[in-house]
Image: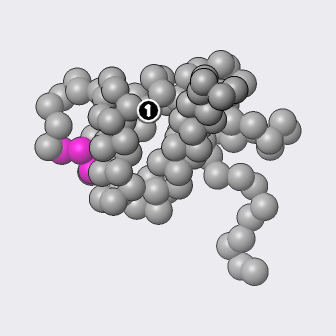
Amino acid sequence: MAGWSARQPTSNCGAWSTITGRSACRERGVNPASGCVRRLVDDYRAQCLWFLRDGYYPETTSEREQVLAAIARHGDLRAFRRVAEVRAWLSQDSSGTSAGS
């Protein structure tokens, strides 16, 4: 298949490691709910989040989801994939701290 690559998509905080198969965020211990989400907001502020004031970053779970939804809806395919990756990380983080764990 032309143009297809088995390499994983680039993470939102740096290159995907083809050696370990893990994202740079996880390898550096960066919490995607803070640093990686901030980088995603910075990368797509002009294209998808033009209505937010400069310097705004989501702080609550609800705010993060609203911003991620706007990026996924108004961004390109790469933005959509990056949002999916961040949502997966957020899901892992929240399930690890749930009362049933």
Up the image or down, 3 lies above or below 98; here it is: below
Residue at the image point whose x is 69% and y is 26% from the top: 101
Instruction: Determine the main secondary structure of the stretch shown in magenta.
Output: helix
Q: Is residue 75 left or right of residue 46?
A: right
**Secondary structure type for disc 1:** helix
Q: In the rendering, at what x and y percent does residue 18 appear?
A: 80, 43
Up the image or down, 19 lies above or below 55; here it is: below
Q: Residues within 10 Å of mark 1 (few under 14, many from 20)?
A: many
Q: Which residue is mark 1?
A: 37
Up the image or down, 6 lies above or below 9; here it is: below
Q: In the rendering, at what x and y percent does residue 100 appear?
A: 65, 28
Q: In the rendering, at what x and y percent does residue 89 appear?
A: 59, 37
Q: Is residue 45 left or right of residue 34?
A: left
- Which residue is at the far front? 100
Q: What range is drawn magenta here? A: 46-50
Query: For residue 5, which quarter of the picture?
Result: bottom right
Q: Amino acid at mark 1?
A: Val
| Image quarter in which the N terminus is found | bottom right
